[in-house]
């Protein structure tokens, strides 16, 4: 049972105890128990436990159930430290050998090691996939047990909210976040500090904070990984936001398709409440804030903020025109601030180390780091965090290990159904919000799907249009009809029945849907079509002639 | 499936848990009711309307808006084949076709013995192991049509035991 923390001193005392626990002289076996479950991580974990029990090694070895360790392509993965080796494709059968060789004797088992260019790389720190990343938001992900608040606190967890409560005013916090240059990581890239300021200045005593965890873009799993691997960072980010804005109540709107994320969040909230880090008079400061989880019911459009608000209110999740913006009139008509999961997970580090330190990474228009979900036809699929301004080539080839087999890179799809396909000619473009937009894609939430020479770009455009057509809520005509007609035309072209005029028709329909739709879904739905027409016109022409 | 067979006690228990603010908890009430019944029977929806004072039309509007809700009985296990972008470029269609073939149902349909309902989802955030599927709340990755078929086979054997 955790003891309630009544003051800042209590938190510091608890941190000292937690740090000592972590420093105990034990070999640590970190097992990913989130994404890797899809390939049998639970069985591997069970076998480790059984073996350690049988061999009486529990005093010398500690198993830590972690969130995503990043290199998902090698799932199920484990890290053993010391000696700091990283193993992939671990099976139940090999667990006894891992214990006798690596855990007890520091010996490396070659066949489980990561291989690049024919070379075996046993130690995690030497693997380019890891050494070329910069983990700021993911600093705890894959390292701590997300279901154990003590491990979060040992790594300076909840120090930011304590600092905010006892050393800063809400205005100081807003200025610090503004200075950091942090922009919304959910896709639109709006400056976070400015958004908070709007809500702080809005009239009204009751204000709400919402964490948008309705990660619905096909190809995106950054938010899932953060929620599963470091839920307390999101909760702490919400606490700081609530203090800055003057809010006493928050909601996390999370997809029902993410059962592990929901489970970890529920446990994290319960632990934070036990420690009095959520609830009334937090750390004896007089500040009150509590949180509730709202589960989505399977509607992509609910990622749009006004639709999300309607859904929390128990209605059909359909967007409404803005203004009024949620900062003035949001949930139940009260001032409401909505931030994405990754945005909120950035907050503790900004407050802890200050905005100057935060800005050491990134570009002028995009400070800090960005998490990308690397998937598709790339060797090292997984979770990648790099400074803004990193090039696609570095992400896909240096970190991602390039394209498997003998095929060629063709395009990177960024930003999901709202984004576009970036061709090989732009591989050396430093990625930030503006540069990506210039080449016809969007940063989006960070989904990055690599496509090789086998992928038909017309088929991909049709695929995304099919998605937007399915997910259009039907409220406004341009989106409802526009996506349907574009889908029909794309299906016709893809089936070899296209006519010469179809391309011009597509462009015109795209223009109308972009300019006349009510919300982001319709406004961005034509992007995949326009970007494939822009860069892969030859593929359309080949199908039409 | 006669309407008379639907027990409305679970719905009453669920609603009583929420106390105030039933209006904004409508989606959660519906989710829990669906967990209890496997789908949303008409009788249960009417009872929700009666107890919460939310018009049945609005409840029906919400139920039909969100893809999670079902108005007809579903199978014991929900098989959700992912059709996200990464899965799409890595052969999700083959997996989907295989599921249709072995279960002999179309998308959104349920097997006659009410063991399986086949669904597709836009993305389950497991793109790094594409193609993937979920059975109930369990994820399965790096599938081929045959691997997926083996997994479902194991579920059917378990149910028959």
Image: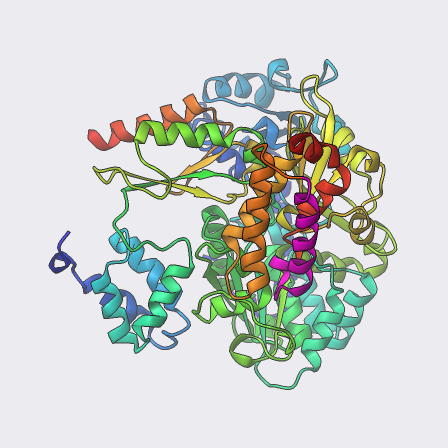
For residue A439, above or below residue A176:
above
> At x 39% / y 76%, what residue is drawn?
B21
For residue B35, above or below residue B12:
above
Q: Is residue A165 left or right of residue A59?
A: right
Residue A541 image-quadrant placement = top right
- Tell me which segment is drawn in magenta: A500-522
Res. A235 in view: yes
State the residue in front, A311 or A249. Answer: A311
- Dominant SS type (magenta): helix
Q: Quadrant of the C terminus of chain A?
A: top right
Q: Is residue A56 left or right of residue A371?
A: left
Q: Quadrant of the N terminus of chain A?
A: bottom left
Task: Look at the image and name its color scheme.
Answer: rainbow
Percent x, y for residue A243? 65, 73
> At x 13% / y 55%, what residue is drawn?
B2
Count of numbered circles in the view: 0
Q: Is residue B13 left or right of residue A407?
A: left
Percent x, y for residue A63? 53, 35
Percent x, y for residue B72? 27, 52
State the residue in front, A219 or B158. Answer: A219
Whether residue A515 appears in magenta in the rendering, the answer is yes
Q: Is residue B160 left or right of residue A178?
A: left
Res. A278 in view: no
State the residue in front, B103 or A10. Answer: B103
> At x 52% / y 61%, what residue is drawn?
A253
For residue A170, above or below residue A92:
below
Whether residue A20 appears in magenta in the rendering, the answer is no
Percent x, y for residue A394? 80, 34
């Amino acid at each position: 049972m955790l003891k309630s923390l009544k003051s800042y001193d209590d938190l510091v005392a608890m941190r000292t105890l937690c740090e000592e626990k972590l420093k105990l002289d034990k070999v640590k076996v970190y097992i990913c128990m989130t994404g890797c479950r899809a390939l049998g991580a639970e069985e591997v974990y069970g076998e480790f436990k059984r073996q350690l029990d049988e061999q009486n090694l529990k005093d010398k070895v500690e198993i830590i159930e972690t969130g995503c360790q990043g290199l998902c392509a090698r799932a199920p993965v484990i890290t053993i430290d010391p000696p700091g080796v990283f193993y992939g494709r671990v099976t139940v059968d090999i667990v006894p050998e891992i214990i006798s060789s690596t855990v007890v004797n520091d010996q490396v088992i070659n066949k489980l090691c990561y291989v690049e260019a024919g070379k075996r790389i046993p130690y995690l720190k030497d693997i380019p996939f890891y050494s070329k990343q910069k983990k700021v938001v993911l600093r705890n992900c894959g390292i701590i047990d997300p279901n154990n608040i003590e491990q979060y606190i040992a790594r300076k967890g909840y120090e930011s909210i304590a600092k905010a409560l006892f050393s800063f005013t809400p205005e100081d916090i807003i200025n610090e976040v503004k200075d950091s240059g942090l922009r919304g990581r959910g896709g639109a890239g709006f400056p976070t500090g400015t958004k908070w300021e709007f809500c702080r200045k809005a009239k009204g005593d009751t204000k709400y904070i919402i964490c948008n965890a309705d990660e619905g873009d096909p190809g995106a799993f950054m938010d899932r990984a953060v929620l599963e691997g470091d839920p307390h960072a999101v909760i702490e980010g919400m606490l700081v936001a609530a203090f800055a804005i003057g809010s006493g109540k928050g909601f996390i709107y999370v997809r029902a398709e993410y059962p592990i994320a929901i489970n970890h969040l529920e446990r994290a909230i319960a632990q934070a409440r036990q420690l009095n880090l959520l609830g009334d008079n937090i750390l004896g400061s007089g500040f009150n804030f509590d949180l509730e989880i709202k589960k989505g019911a399977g509607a992509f459009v609910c990622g749009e903020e006004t639709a999300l608000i309607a859904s929390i209110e128990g209605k059909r999740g359909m967007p409404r025109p803005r203004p009024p913006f949620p900062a003035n009139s949001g949930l139940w008509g009260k001032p409401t601030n909505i931030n994405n999961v990754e945005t909120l997970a950035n907050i503790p580090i900004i407050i802890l180390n200050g905005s100057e330190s935060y800005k050491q990474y990134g570009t002028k228009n995009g400070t800090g780091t960005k998490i990308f979900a690397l998937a598709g036809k790339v060797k090292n699929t997984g979770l990648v965090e790099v400074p803004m301004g990193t090039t696609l080539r570095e992400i896909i080839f240096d970190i991602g290990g390039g394209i498997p087999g003998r095929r060629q890179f063709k395009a990177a799809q960024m930003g999901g159904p709202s984004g576009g396909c970036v061709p090989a000619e732009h591989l050396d473009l430093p990625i930030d919000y503006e540069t990506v937009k210039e080449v016809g894609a969007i940063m989006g939430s960070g989904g990055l799907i690599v496509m090789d020479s086998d992928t038909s770009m017309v088929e991909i455009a049709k695929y995304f249009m099919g998605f937007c057509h399915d997910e259009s809520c039907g409220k406004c005509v341009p989106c409802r009809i526009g996506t349907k007609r574009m889908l029909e035309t794309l299906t016709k072209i893809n089936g070899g029945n296209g006519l010469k005029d179809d391309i011009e028709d597509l462009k015109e329909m795209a223009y109308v849907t972009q300019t006349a739709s009510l919300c982001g879904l319709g406004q961005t739905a034509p992007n995949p079509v326009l970007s494939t027409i822009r860069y892969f016109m030859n593929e359309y022409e080949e199908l039409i002639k | 499936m006669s309407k008379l067979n639907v027990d409305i006690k679970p719905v009453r228990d669920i609603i009583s848990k929420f106390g105030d603010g039933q209006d904004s908890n409508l989606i959660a009430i519906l989710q829990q009711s669906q967990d209890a019944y496997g789908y949303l029977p008409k009788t249960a929806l009417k009872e929700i309307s009666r107890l919460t004072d939310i018009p049945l039309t609005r409840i029906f509007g919400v139920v039909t808006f969100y893809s999670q809700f079902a108005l007809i009985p579903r199978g014991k296990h929900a098989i959700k084949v992912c059709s996200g972008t990464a899965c799409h470029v890595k052969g999700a269609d083959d997996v989907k076709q295989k599921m249709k073939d072995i279960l002999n149902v179309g998308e959104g349909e349920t097997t006659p013995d009410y063991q399986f309902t086949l669904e597709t989802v836009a993305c389950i955030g497991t793109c790094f192991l594409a193609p993937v599927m979920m059975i109930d709340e369990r994820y399965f990755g790096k599938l081929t049509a045959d691997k997926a078929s083996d997994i479902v086979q194991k579920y059917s054997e378990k149910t028959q035991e």
